[in-house]
Each structure stands twice: as C-alpha cells, then as structure tokens.
Amino acid sequence: VQAVFRSNLSHLLDLMGSGKESLIFMKKRTKRLTAQWALAAQRLAQKLGATQRDQKQILVHIGFLTEESGDVFSPRVLKGGPLGEMVQWADILAALYVLGHGLRVTVSLKELQSNLGVPPGRGSCPLTMPLPFDLIYTDYHGLQQMKQHMGLSFKKYRCRIRVIDTFGTEPAYNHEEYATLHGYRTNWGYWNLNPKQFMTMFPHTPDNSFMGFVSEELNETEKQLIKGGKASNMAVVYGKEASIWKLQGKEKFLGILNKYMEIHGTVYYESQRPPEVPAFVKNHGLLPQPEFQQLLRKAKLFIGFGFPYEGPAPLEAIANGCIFLQSRFSPPHSSLNHEFFRGKPTSREVFSQHPYAENFIGKPHVWTVDYNNSEEFEAAIKAIMRTQVDPYLPYEYTCEGMLERIHAYIQHQDFCVAPGPALPGAHTPQSPFVLAPNATHLEWAQNASLAPAAWPPAHSLRAWLATPGRACTDTCLDHGLICEPSFFPFLNSQDAFLKLQVPCDSTESEMNHLYPAFAQPGQECYLQKEPLLFSCAGSNTKYRRLCPCRDFRKGQVALCQGCL
Ligand code: UDP
C-alpha cells in the first residue's frame, strides 16, 4: 500500500486519547498547527513528485507518560514543568500521520501489551510472535517496558525500534561490553542498538539521528507586522520554573538589564509571586502556548539564565523576531561537572545554554556572552537594542523540514539488515579514494560502484585525518562538513591509511570508540573491530582520528546534498 499525504488531523486527535494534562497540551498544539502541517505536506508532495512511498504500520509508545514509569511530567504541565518533550512527541505524531502512515498511539502498559498481542496479566510473552508494526517509536522508559513484556520478540524486532532521546546516546555508552569494561555504564543502560536508532531533539551528536520538532512559521505579512510592532525595550526571561531565578550573581546582570529594558517573566506561581523573582520583573505566570507566542512577538530580547538546556523556547523566540541572549559556559558543562548531565550517556561538552542556537543560528539572532563580565554583558544589551533582526526559523525546524527528514529516515534507514563488516571485506572497493592536494583529505571516488544502496550515498564521503585530541564531530565541522558515522566502514582499512599517506609502522585491530586512528609516538595505526563502536564523538590527545565527513544541506543538516 502506498502512503498518501494527509491534511486533516482530526482522526489523529482521536488516536491520541485523552484525560492527561500532557495529552491535552499536545492535542491543542496539534490542532493549532494543522494548517501549517497541511501546507507543508502539499509542498513536500510536490518536491517528491512520483517517489514511491510504502505505507508503514507504526506504533508510537510514549513511555514517559505511562503510569508504570511514574508519569512525573503530566501533573507538572500546568505548573511550569518541562514541556519540550511533549512539544516533540506531538510533532512526531503529526509528522508520521501527515506522511500517511498507519498509526497506533499508546500511553499505558496495558495498551502497549494489547497492541503487541501480549495477553494482559501475563508478565511477558515467552514466544516470538509476529510483530504487526514495521516501526516503533518510543523512549528509554518504553524500551525498558518492551524488553520486559515482549519476551523473545524483543531481540528479534529491536531493529524496528526508534528511541526518542533528547540529549543523545554515544556509541561508547551503547555497547554493553565496552561500556562495562571502560566505565561508560549509565542508568540508561547499554542496549547495543545501532546508535542511529537513537533520535535527538537537536542535531548535536551525528552518531544519533536528528529528529527535532517544529516551530510555527510566519508568512511575510506576519513578519512585517511583527517587526513594526516590537517594543525595543522589552525583554522576556527564558524559564517557567521559579528555581532558575535562584542563580547566583543574577542581581548584577539583571540590574544592568533593568537599566535598559522592561523585564517580563512567565514563571509559574500558585497564589503569590514567587519570592525568587525580583519585584521589578513583570511576571505573567505560566502562559498557554499561543499567549506565550504573542508575548514573544512584542519582545525585543529573550534572555536565558543558563537553564533549561536546549529547549524549544529560544527557537520560538527567534522565529518571532526576538534576539536570544545567553550565557557562555566556561568551563563547559558536561556529565563530569554538572548534576543535570550526570549519568546521561554522552560525553558532550556544552559551551552555552543552547549550543544549537549558538552554532547553527548565531548573530545577529543569537548572542552568547559571559554574564560574569558586566562590561561585555552591558555592551551586548546596548548593541542588541540597536540591532534590527528579521524573524528567522531554520528550515529543519519548519513543518516541511521535519516532514522531509522523517520521510528520508523512513525511506532509507533500515537497521534490520546486518551492518557491513568493520574490517575490510565486502565493503572495500578497489580504488576508493581520490587524493586531495594536501594529502590529509580524501574524496570518495564518484565512480565508486560499491554498495549502491548505501545511504547516505557513498559519493558524499570526504575523509579527514583529525589533529591529535580532536573529535570527528569537530574535525568535520572545522571543514564545513558533518561527521557521518555510516561511512566509517569505508575508512576502516589499511588501504585508507595508505591513501592518506599515514606512515603506519604496524596495524592493529581493537575495540575502541576512537578507532580508526593513528598514534603518533609509535607510528601505530589502529582499526576498529566492532562496528557498533564507530563513533563521531570522542577524542584523546594520544590519537589522530580518521574521520568520515559529508556535506549537508544548509538548514537541513541531517541530509546531504542529493540524498533525499
Ligand atoms: N511555553 C509555554 N508557556 C510559557 C512558556 C513556555 O507554553 O509561559 C512553552 C513554549 O512555547 C515551548 C515549551 O513551553 O514550546 C517548552 O519550552 P522550553 O524551551 O522551556 O523547554 P522545556 O524546558 O519546557 O522542555
């Protein structure tokens, strides 16, 4: 059966169920965005032309909303609790539905069991049953529940699972044996999935797939209207929970801001104003999403205090013509030094509250400064007040961009076929490289005839030898490219080192998430033994890593040019 784009979302709203505050929030959002989704579907349909798309049967099991996992978020929806996850799940559901796939949505263990064909009351199903879904989208909580209740089927069908995982899971933490041996074990487990099965909220770890969410897009008339109606001295503070105002040293920079601007907040409170929020701040209380957007349309500045990390709100602010001001973190926050990241399966270092805003959007929309430096802070405020900006939304966060990306994943990502060998073999072409002039950069030969079904297509590979201590994520970005872990097998050979003119005295093959790599002192070359450990993330001053990079479309970093 072919998938047909849908523009009427009323049946999806029924599928989403009811009762919980979180579901009410999600459904309101979906309803509000219906027209945008419909328009995006039209545009993508035109772009794809006659492309054949199979209709998939998809189960979406939102684990964190189940009572069995404690459902800590639903009761906090109206109290300033996190909403980013709900924004994302609402948009994932909308995208899958608009793309025309068959959908089931479950938010309880009972519904999950009945959809999987597990008899209720029985702990788990001992036999392998045929799975009536081509794809399952879930989260870490849901993954655990499926493992407990699917019995042997779990192992057989895990390749069909996609795990929505806000901050990402790096390969070193995902591989059970390796994580156990080398101290990468976390509470989230080590599931031995293909790292691309984890899907993140922002494109920060190319080892995982970037799922994202959407923000409302304005048409030209709306943009002009907003630009005309901005109050140049109005600032809105990022954060719904009073706790973010406990920040040490805030008096100093808030005092400076207050000299120039009227400061607004949307901090949740029960009966009286939260004591943490200074009296000069005009607090509106937690606003419904559409009213929050209206506030952003009037404001000039959206200011972050350092927490929450990487949420949707700054993108919405920028889309509504605000400038986003945030603090630089020095030293960077990570699982080594910050409670929030502790125990998360990532080694990523976060250099500001919203690295995506800093690195992918930047000035004039995003200003990242040191809040402890009063002069730098004050200069930024003054400059911001003089700066005119247009509302801006990166394509990957529009409805069309998200539809396009999920379409590409569904069309091309198949983790049920066995991955190629880590070591040279079937995947090693006769003459894989074109040597670049400086001999530290290789281009994939255009005529490479191997693995024609590979996705992204192998011709977009550009190989670089990293400098010592540099991760592949950064090395690729240094060259205006993105690391593409699925290309690692092409570089994992003596031949690749040879072509890069790396003088290997000896070559060894081991399990190490930094391999393939070259160690300078002993002139030793190391190959990767375990395909699951190929990792863009990670570095060590001992090694020069061999990095597979690819180009990407501006505003759609998940896709290379010509790989739709
Ligand atoms: N939001 C809202 N009312 C408010 C402030 C924010 O509905 O008063 C919404 C906002 O539109 C955004 C969502 O809350 O889509 C989550 O934003 P945030 O970046 O704060 O992420 P979180 O920490 O909640 O995951």
Image (cartoon, rainbow, N blue to C red):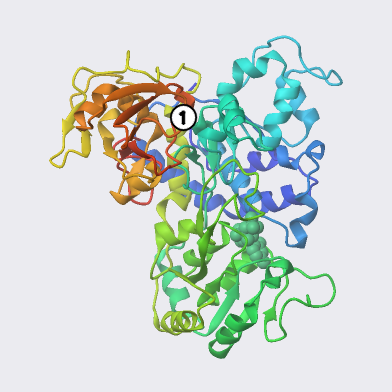
Instruction: Identify which residue is drawn at 21% across, 27% down.
Output: 498
Percent position (x, y) of residue 355? 48, 57
**Residue placed most toward the observer, 508 or 274:** 508
Q: Is residue 371 above or below residue 545?
A: below
Pick the quarter of the image with the C terminus: top left
For residue 322, say whether it is visible: no
Q: Is mark 1 within 8 Å of ligand 1?
A: no
Specify few, some or many for label 1: CA neighbours under 10 Å numbering under 14, 14-19, or 20 or more.
some
Q: Quadrant of residue 93?
A: top right
Q: Quadrant of residue 490?
A: top left
Label 1 SS: loop
Residue occupying the far front of the picture: 522
Q: Quadrant of residue 391?
A: bottom left
Q: Which residue is mark 1?
A: 512
Residue occupying the far left of the picture: 437
Residue occupying the far bottom of the picture: 259
Instruction: Identify which residue is drawn at 23% across, 32% down.
Output: 502
**Residue placed most toward the observer, 490 or 347:** 347
**526 horizontally vs 380: left or right:** left
Which residue type does callout 1 highlight?
Asn
